[in-house]
Amino acid sequence: MIPNPGSILPGLMQPAPLQIIDILRFAATAHGSVEVVSRLVEEPIARSTYADELKRVERAASALVRLGAKAGDRIASLAWNTHRHFELFYAVTGLGAVLNTVNPRLFDEQIVFILNHAEPEILLFDKTFLPLVERLAPQMKTVKTFVMLTDGTVHVPGEVGALCYETLLAAETDGFAWPVTDENAGAFLCYTSGTTGDPKGVLYSHRAVVLHAMASGLNSAFGFTAFDVVMPCSSLFHATAWGLPFAAPINGCKLVLPCEKMDGASLQELIVSEGVTFSGGVPTIWTMYLEHLERTGQTPGGLKRLVIGGSAVPRAMAERFKTQHGVQVLQIWGMTETTPLGVIATPTPALAALGEEAIDEAIWTRQGRLQFGIELRVVDEAGNDVPRDGESSGALLVRGPWTIRRYFRAPADAVNDEGWFDTGDIATLDQFGFMRITDRKKDVIKSGGEWISSIDLENIAVAYPGVKIAAVVGIAHPKWEERPLLVLELYPEAKVAAADVLSHMAAHIAKWQLPDEIVFDTVPLTATGKIDKKTLRIRYADRYG
Ligand code: ADP
């Protein structure tokens, strides 16, 4: 895949491998007193520091080795955003094993599929998941040891005879002889949710994770300083919470972990009491948070930046955050296959020269701009690059040191001969290097031979007052092939007339793109918090014939 340039003169610098554990070792030394604060299941908030965390990670690694863990093994977790899960991120990978973070919101069959595909012998889980673990344990072919991420006060072994995490740590001593691990060794095994077909395993290497963590803190991306207080609200079980458990310690940022409590009031409590300056997650979480602020009249403390992605950011929400609360929303695009950060929308001088409105427009309606470390191409059906005019769309291809090469246990590479990975997204690129997703390939609507972007329609509809979530899906139509159907979920007590939403939309789009009708319904979400279009398409499949 990579051409051999012939004979080279070897460099004479140290070939020190990029290792994940070195991030925490660095933070413990350089930012040892910086806090890690964590909500827990059924336990009070835990407070520690990076120095404490390194000691706990050493003990966790010793305990795992005592339970039989060794380099190359997969070790699974079913856990929320807590400091114990954070510790596994370092302990498991530090000893040379692979942490298989399983998304507990998947269907039972998918969880069983993933565990039997990854083949872990040890499964560590939060107490919340005891019923799930008990129910599925008989189908887990390889798991022999269960560990509950609890302390002795709330621990119950359950039918699986789970060991207690804190008891295991207490039995060990500080210190662990970290092995030197090849930087290309696997470190995390994250499965895509498998909305089509079985989940697919993406095996991040140490090298990919460390490079990604270094790049994501840059000013052109998250822009971290040691004054930041970072609260990841993307899940640790979903593509390592955008690598925030690494980027925060690299930059000496205080880390706040909200467990599973992502409702507006719970987030507000931590944002204010812990001085959170930076957070991120899928749009639905921040829609709820904004609604909480508006309902209670509260202000978002010292929160300065919100990075939102996973699905398209509603422009109206980003605008309200800025104008009413002084919070800068930056959009991010990525996928499990890109560790997961692909691009992020941050301002540039070229945009600034056009004025503040141009900056807002770009960072709220584009998914991001080209970043070093991930190359982007948008190609037409013949594989040729489309013009960078912000209008011409095509398949989005990516390539780089934290982009997937092959799925775990797949017989062939997932990239073409030149290393390009087809993301399955349809996008445009503009002259400023900003990329805009118009749709996922499978969600594109084809009506009367023309393409309609579901994301564009959703963005316009969700700006209408009272609308909480807007989802647009293509429904088979006898005359037009497909027509867009708009499904709206409203805020409680909101009164919205379909005709008013349609006339609001008509001002922004061509008439033929306008949905023929609107249905008011609850919008189903996937296990990763995206609009579940597959379920909506099935629900309304026969609507037009
Ligand atoms: P899953 O399908 O399991 O949820 P991912 O989290 O890897 O897996 O999903 C990645 C996909 O999410 C991308 O390919 C893209 O379609 C969508 N996505 C991510 N960020 C954005 C964004 N900012 N705007 C629109 N779509 C996005």
Image (tube, grey):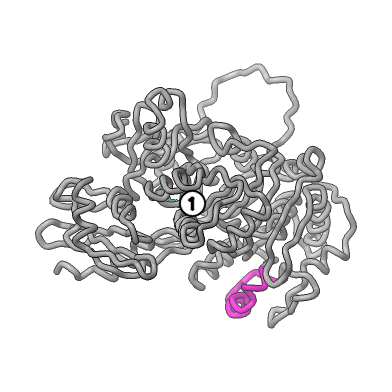
| Residue 138 part of the magenta-drawn span | yes
Q: Is residue 147 visible?
A: no
Quadrant of the frame with the C terminus: bottom left
User: Where is 444 relative to 527, above or below?
Assistant: above
Q: Is mark 1 within 8 Å of ligand 1?
A: no
User: Where is 118 relative to 142, above or below?
Assistant: above
Magenta span: predominant SS is: helix
Q: Where in the figure is residue 395, as x and y percent of width and height?
A: 33, 41
Residue at 43% x, 36% y: name it.
Answer: 417
Q: Is residue 373 visible?
A: yes
Amino acid residing under circle 1:
Pro
Place residue 185 in its image quadrant: top right
- Give, as a single range, the part of the protein colored magenta: 126-145
Most foreground residue, 395 or 279? 279
Q: Where in the figure is residue 397, as x and y percent of width and height?
A: 40, 39
User: Where is 29 relative to 86, above or below?
Assistant: above
Residue at 54% x, 49% y: name it.
Answer: 280
User: Where is 51 relative to 150, above or below?
Assistant: above
Most foreground residue, 141 or 79? 79
Residue at 33% x, 50% y: name it.
Answer: 459
> Which residue, given by chain and number where applicable, does mark 1 sit on?
411
Asked which secondary structure carries label 1, the reply is loop
| Residue 232 part of the magenta-drawn span | no
Q: Where in the figure is residue 536, as x and y percent of width and height?
A: 31, 66
Place residue 479 in its image quadrant: bottom left
Q: Where in the figure is residue 401, as x and y percent of width and height?
A: 55, 36
